Image: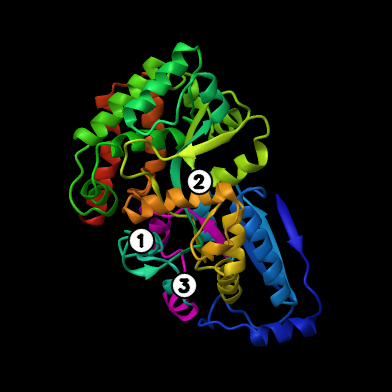
Amino acid sequence: MFKVRTGVAMAAMLVALAACGSTEQAAGTPAAQGPRVLKLWHYEGADSAMGKAWAEAVKQFEASHPGVTVTFEEKAFEQIRQSAGMILNSDEAPDVMEYNKGNATAGLLSKQGLLTDLSAEAATRGWDKLLSPSLQTTARYDERGVMGTGKWFGVPNYAEYVMVYYNKDAFAKQGIEIPTTYDEFTAALEKFVKAGITPISVGGAEYPAQQIFYQLALSKAQRPWVDALQLYNGKTDFRGPEFTYAADTFADWVKKGYIGKDSAGIKAEDMGVSFIGGKYPIMVSGSWWYGRLVSDIKDFAWGSFLWPGNTMSAGSSGNLWVVPQNAKNKDLAYDFIDITMEKEIQNLLGNSGGIPVAADPAAITDAKSKELIENFTTLSASDGLAFYPDWPAPGYYDVLVSGVQNLINGTRTPAQVLDEIAGPYNENLADIGD
């Protein structure tokens, strides 16, 4: 999708430039010669909470920057993930874009010198005050590209977590209550199978299946294990009880019919469409689906709950606004990020099915949005955000996709899959000197 919005006269543009503040006046802040363009990329659908909020942010940006043209390109998540390094190392880089957070993605690009250091802007514009320390974890990276400390290379303006979405009508038809324990959850899965229903909609070709794998590992994990895996604060044993349980149980769920044997080739979009269409009673995925489900599900009642029995869940701040080092209009990029952090945009995001980071709580009036945010608050307050399984090492996303596909297809044993995912992780540790 490609959208272009045209600015107004040169005289008005010069006035806007005079009023437009920035802490950086070097490459990326061109002289006021001719119309200026803010080139924006992100991969959120127009009906998602973020898509709605950011569309409004673009309108507000245009109103406050007369004479500036905003060029917006909607990219696919996979498109940006696979080609970001090449694009950002060229003169085709956007001025501001949404990018995945974590060591393997934003951390890697920061280490390669492809992202702008936003530390001064974060302090000047107060982003460091709006974001809690836990949400700042994914915004900051050290010289090794490891998250949690160091310079600001991105700004999240929403949060997210993985949950269990469920079809209330399908549950009621089978006489199943919302499970509050892990045993009740597996009993519900078994009841659906006995009724001839594959319970979980799964996308094995992309991120969803590996997140189920990670949720299973987290059911046996404590915070030190997560910090060792994600932050390298300790050693990770891939043959330890956490990952062993995850691999064994995931393979067992396929054998029992909880996960379809044909799901290895299914993409995330197809997984979501299948749940929306009522084909499956359960979908395990992130809060980024929430607004879409609100908009698209018309034929049944639905809800969500945290993974039963876990004290931790995959989750973190949302994806980051990053400013490429080669961006031509960095000052405009900073202004746009600033607008997405304002209360009006944050409140809209919250009422559209997203999890805002700087909203006015009293302004969130939508009942489903309140449920979503309350569950996130439960996780966040108990230090329950465990990041995502593909973060620890560059290229680890593809390693995990392959690993869980092997579990679904039965082409490798659980022990073999654990060795398969251990190798690249340990190689990365050796590369960064830990």
Vertical order, 407 against 316 (above or below): above
Rendering coords of residue 118 (x, y %): 45, 72
Rendering coords of residue 411 (x, y %): 36, 19
Q: Which residue is mark 1?
A: 134
Circle 2 — which element? helix
Circle 1 — which element? helix
Looking at the image, residue 357 sits to the left or right of residue 50; the answer is: left
Vertical order, 353 against 15 (above or below): above
Q: Which residue is mark 2?
A: 287
Q: Which residue is mark 3?
A: 127
Badge number at residue 85: none
The residue range painted magenta reads: 96-125
Q: CA distance from mark 3 to mark 2?
A: 23 Å
Q: CA distance from mark 1 to mark 2?
A: 18 Å
Q: Residue at x 61, y 52 (%)?
A: 352
**Amino acid under label 2?**
Ser
Q: Residue furthest right?
A: 9
Q: Do the numbered discs 1 and 2 sit on residues whose CB atoms are within 8 Å?
A: no
Residue 44 magenta: no
**Amino acid under label 3?**
Trp
Q: Is residue 263 visible?
A: yes
Q: Earlier in the sequence, mark 3 or mark 2?
A: 3
- For the residue pair 194 and 222, the one nearer the viewer reads as 194
Rendering coords of residue 312 (x, y %): 32, 45
Q: Earlier in the sequence, mark 1 or mark 2?
A: 1
Looking at the image, residue 256 sits to the left or right of residue 76; the answer is: left
Vertical order, 123 against 280 (above or below): below
